Amino acid sequence: LQGYVGFANLPNQVHRKSVKKGFQFTAMVVGESGLGKSTLVNTLFNTQLYPPKEDVELTHETSQTVEIKSITSDIEENGVKLRLTVVDTPGFGDFVNNEESWKPILDNIESRYDTYLEQENRVNRRRTMDNRIHACIYFITPTGHALKQMDIEFMRRLHTRVNLIPVIAKADTLTEEEVAAFKERILADINYHNIQIYQAPAYEYDDQETIDENREIMSKIPFAVVGSDKEFDVEGGRRVRGRQYPWGVIEVDNEEHCDFVKLRQMLIRTHMEELKEYTNDVLYENYRTEKLSAMGI
Ligand code: GDP
Ligand code: MG
């Protein structure tokens, strides 16, 4: 893939540590039906070596049902393996009353913390499995106007529990100007409601190149994404993944066309370790403390 940079290019130290332990990362996708979640997951997994293992579990929460479906695949680059799991949540927001649509998602995230906590409390902690969600990709309907009440409610309820990464779904249905204006409006709404979306810290010891790259990635949030499982031949004899329009092809892997590459880079290269650390050190730690104090411990 042209311009593709993957997890094999992580900074050396982090890289060496992780190569030994093996990379393992879990992301969740949430958003209304039809926004392209499943397509984006397939687009992310395009470099898979083995067919994805599907593992379906059902959760029944309150009167509503959201199916929680996780897909795990080992992807490999330059001899480095990453076990990537994506948890899909079909059914979110599909009910007549969506007031509590955030609840089954929050319950799922917290029950993963509970499982981890139980393992930590065991005497033999050698084989700890980490099924915690390291990033939650939230799909925003490409209306071009503002966030919906349901979006605000979801993010307000979840932001202290998971790293939230908002994306504009099906960005190819908006013009470049519409995307830019919509991004501003979304960030203003998020700010107004005091919602904390994922923000990468800047480290003093980072080199200028890393600082610039991180700043560039962060400046694209909410990422305007396009997903596709189709390829087309375009000018210059290139074969690209994209979506075809009468006037041409919108390319998934072209940074001039959308932010898919930036999202992928952030998840599996530049911010993978950081997202995992923040989940463990801050989000999980806060949950654990609240839980233990509620139990009077
Ligand atoms: P999900 O319900 O959120 O999982 O959505 P799907 O991935 O099943 O996609 C729903 C429909 O939207 C399908 O017809 C897809 O081909 C289409 N779709 C998916 N991603 C995109 C996108 O980025 N742009 C456009 N225009 N259509 C998309
Ligand atoms: Mg789907």
Image (cartoon, helix red, strand yellow):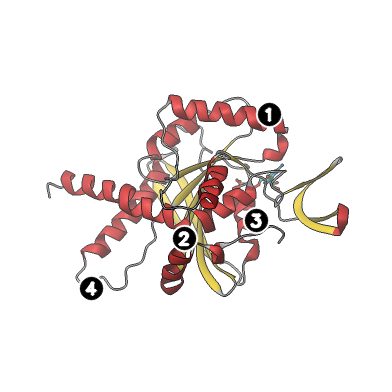
**Up-down relation of residue 15 to residue 233 (above or below):** below
Q: Earlier in the sequence, mark 3 or mark 2?
A: 2
Disc 3/disc 4 C-alpha distance (Å): 39 Å
Q: Position of residue 90 (x, y in %)?
A: 54, 48
Q: Earlier in the sequence, mark 4 or mark 2?
A: 2
How many residues crowd around disc 4 within 10 Å: few (fewer than 14), some, or many (20 or more)? few
Residue 143 appears in the rendering: no
Element type at mark 3: helix
Q: Residues within 10 Å of mark 1 (few under 14, many from 20)?
A: some
* Residue nearer the viewer, 140 or 190: 190
Identify the residue shown where x is 57% and y is 75%. 79
**Residue that numbered label 2 is attached to:** 25
Label 4: state its secondary structure: loop
Of helix, strand and loop, which one carries label 2? strand
Depth check, front residue: 19 or 247: 19
Question: Which residue is painted at 56% across and 45% down in the image?
Answer: 217
C-alpha distance separating marks 3 and 2:
17 Å
x and y percent of residue 202 in the render? 43, 45
Q: Amino acid at mark 4?
A: Asn
Q: Is residue 110 above or below residue 7?
A: above
Q: What type is the residue that disc 2 sits on?
A: Phe
Q: Tag on residue 43?
A: 3
Disc 3 under 8 Å from ligand 1? The reply is no
Estimate the x, y position of residue 162 in percent, counting from the top left: 40, 46
Tag 4 and tag 2, C-beta contact below 8 Å: no
Q: Which residue is mark 1?
A: 178
Where does the image place residue 9, in percent across and percent down from the top left?
A: 55, 64
Residue at which label 4 appears: 124
Crowding at dot 3, Cα within 10 Å, few <14 / some 14-19 / many 20+, comes out as many
- Of the pair 87 and 290, the residue shown nearer to us: 290
Residue 239 visible (yes or no): yes
Q: Earlier in the sequence, mark 3 or mark 4?
A: 3
